[in-house]
Image (cartoon, rainbow, N blue to C red):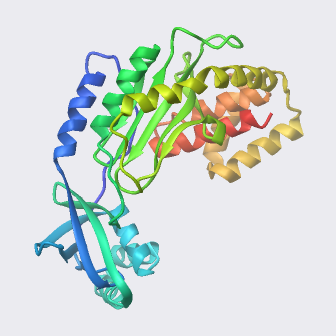
Amino acid sequence: MLKNGGREFLTQLGTKNVSIEQLLTQAEMMEKSWRDDLIVGNTRVPISLTEDLKAGYITRDGRQVSVDLTDNALSQMCGRAGIPVKYMRDLFENGDRDLAVENWIRMSNKLVSSETVLRSRVYEDTARAVLTDDYHPFDNSRILEGVWQAARGAGYEANQAFLSPDKLHIRFVDFNNPLKVRNGLYPGFTVSSSNVGTGAFSIQYFLFRFACRNGIVHGSLKGILFRQTHQKSFDAEASGIFVRAFVKMEELNAMFEHQIGKAARNRLGKEELERVFKDAQKELHLGERGLREVRTLVEKTYSPSTWGVVNALTEAAQSSRYGLDRRMEIESYAGKILQAV
């Protein structure tokens, strides 16, 4: 059976219901439910697939395992077997399951010249990732504790967060030091980590707008305060890493104050504004409804300027139609527009 989580949304922290202490406890409990199975074979993907979308394999220590799959794990398996995952999904969804399994057997059982070693990341009897054996999972509870300790010492407050077995995303804001260029703008940073092979562990510069609680993620090289792939173990001195990352914050604050001033002064004519809208629609695949929302926000709430477009995009990103990944994509695009002024 293919198992997937629901839509991912950020939760406001500091309320009576959710605190960072509760998040830390939840992360520690989740960590105990993970199991990593090492699979060895001489084929492309030494894993069987049944018509009810269960994966089967024999671990290096001889255990025979049968697990459900997430869509992410199926995608990773198909990628290694050389099968388009969309093709496989369509076969299963259209009832051609026997053909799907036949294709899987034919492609996954092709012999390879060197031994295949895979890591199946299993959470509560569901394989959530199928990765190479050199993938190093990070303990989200350690990341969360380290960044919390460092952030408190530097005056940052945990503001919003999302935590699942697969993913950690948390946003910290310095509410004591607003940017000088605009009222209600506060500097901060985001911390993101995936334990299923969908992204590196990163800390990125972030701007928080208090009025509508939208944010701008600065995802360029300058805005990345720290980044580590899962090809090596996470440093045990987590809080020290975070403290060193914060050294760049003052420099980035000054840079963004300058960029925001330029963006606010950069008024856009009708044709130029239309080009900006069309570029955003193309890059972000907004669709007619999404573009209409951004256009309305620029015309009725903000202004026909680069800064107005940036705010319109980040406010639209909070729509309930968008999950966390989509929201971050739009916020990062807004950051690129701001940087390019």
Q: Is residue 295 left or right of residue 10?
A: right
Q: Is residue 138 above or below residue 293?
A: below
Q: Residue 89 at x, y = what percent?
A: 39, 72
Q: Residue 171 at x, y = what percent?
A: 45, 28
Residue lying at 44% horizontally and 80% vertically, measured from the top left: 83
Extreme residue in the top direction:
176
Q: Is residue 155 left or right of residue 331?
A: left
Quarter of the image with the C terminus is top right
The answer to whether any part of residue 278 appears in the image is: yes
Residue situated in front as seen by the camera: 102 or 235: 235
Q: Residue 216 at x, y = what percent?
A: 60, 31
Q: Is residue 282 left or right of residue 164?
A: right
Quarter of the image with the N terminus is bottom left
Q: How many marks?
A: 0
Q: Is residue 245 above or below residue 57?
A: above
* Quarter residue 247 falls in: top right
The answer to whether any part of residue 302 appears in the image is: no
Residue lying at 46% horizontally and 13% vertically, measured from the top left: 155
Q: Is residue 62 left or right of residue 316?
A: left
Q: Residue 52 at x, y = what percent?
A: 22, 74
